[in-house]
Image: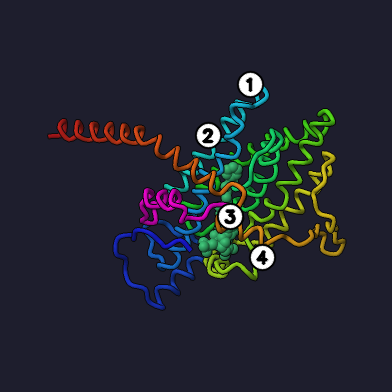
Amino acid sequence: MTSPVSRPPATEPESADRIAAFEARIANGESIEPKDWMPEKYRQQLVRMMSQHAHSEVVGMLPEGNWITRAPSLRRKMILLSKVQDEAGHGLYIYCGTETLGVDRHELVEQLLSGKAKYSSIFNYPTITYADVGVIGWLVDGAAIVNQTVLAKASYGPYARAMIRICKEENFHKRQGFELVAHLSQDGTPEQKAMVQDAVDRWWWPSLMMFGPHDKDSPNSDSLLRWRVKRFTNDELRQRFINLTIPQARAVGLTVPDPDLVFNEETKNWETGPIDWDEFWRVVKGEGPCNRERLAARNKAHDEGAWVRAAATAYAEKHAHRKQTEAA
Ligand code: BYC
């Protein structure tokens, strides 16, 4: 786990009574706000999860951003540009959310750039054809919506509120992705149909891995569920996503690369074959197909943006100084 970073101003010490009162508030469905007392472990878990989420949004701009200059039409370029720009905004909202927990955003960004921080495994796979843009919108944003719709009811107010806004935009992302996928698979040439099926074949399993390890291998779930940051387990949300997505694939004549996929009439669940967890952990530990490329791209963008940050700081200082002089 990434070590928790800067601390909030000293709060009243933890005691069994205080923790019991805190947990009673959560059980009562109350929202925890930045100035409320919270156990240090709750704060640390939120910083861990929210910072990983913010990093994922920012790194998540890279695979699709790769196609902005090669979008096949002006319409597709405009859609892709605004989607990628939305992801930057999502990163910002969530970084702001972590700051309400007394964390310095620069420290978090430093952890990402140095390779210490985790971000979603999904963004370490390459985008080989334009069909990947559609499939990412459909599957990756689709998975994110399933996860984040529930996080919109998380016990920590600033995170939950950020999720409400983000989910609205993710819905647009998913729909543009599915529209592109449907267009290629239904109206496309045989080559385009093959291209979109190939993209589904490559993104299907990594999308299922986005939900995290099986519940029995998920060390953080117990406390997150108890504190109602998570409302459902990794496996429950993964199953919900599978059940939603298989009918969509069928509707546009696509298949998922799983010979063991079967519909269980009793449970009404689509049951998949085994997920390759070795691959998942390799990617999480930095050995995925694009981990190094993604970190190099983020570092390059950060270095090249130094002058923008310096200019913004100088501008803010100039205005603060002017205000002070006017007030004097
Ligand atoms: N990738 O105990 P567990 C987007 C780590 S971006 C990498 O189950 P937890 C988009 C986990 O961190 C939206 N690492 O963890 C953007 C933990 O390690 P540490 C991304 C993973 O937190 C651009 C360890 O494995 N969404 O939508 O209870 C374009 C054990 O796991 C992953 C979010 O970030 C993974 N997939 O549950 C398009 C959602 N899974 O920290 C789209 C917010 C697990 O103990 N996050 N790990 O060292 C969550 O909901 C939860 O954090 C997770 C994991 C379900 C991901």
- Mark 4 or 1 closer to N-term? 1
Whether tag 3 and tag 4 are in contact, CB under 8 A, the answer is no
Q: Secondary structure at mark 3?
A: helix
- State the separation of the CA atoms marked 2 and 3: 28 Å
Q: Nearer the viewer, mark 3 or mark 1?
A: 3
The residue furthest left is 328
Q: Which mark is residue 85?
A: 2
Q: Which mark is residue 287?
A: 3
User: How many C-alpha atoms fall within 10 Å of the one at disc 4: few (<14), some, or many (≥20)?
Assistant: some
Q: Which residue is mark 4?
A: 214
**Is residue 326 found left or right of 291 in the rendered image?**
left
Say which of 142 and 16 sits in front.
Answer: 142
Q: Residue at x 85, y 31 (%)?
A: 190
Where does the image place residue 127, in percent across and percent down from the top left?
65, 39
Tell me whether circle 2 and circle 3 mark residues in contact (CB < 8 Å). Answer: no
| In the displayed structure image, the side of residue 298 where residue 321 appears, left or right | left
For image coordinates 45% across by 61% down, the residue present is: 2
Q: CA distance from mark 3 to mark 4?
A: 20 Å
Q: Say what amino acid the circle numbered 3 marks.
A: Glu
Residue type (three-letter) at the residue carrying disc 2: Gln
Q: Quadrant of the C terminus?
A: top left
Of the image marks 2 and 3, the number of the one nearer the N terminus: 2
Tell me where the magenta segment starts and ends, as one range: 97-123
Which image quadrant for residue 262?
A: bottom right
Q: Earlier in the sequence, mark 3 or mark 4?
A: 4
Residue position for label 1: 74
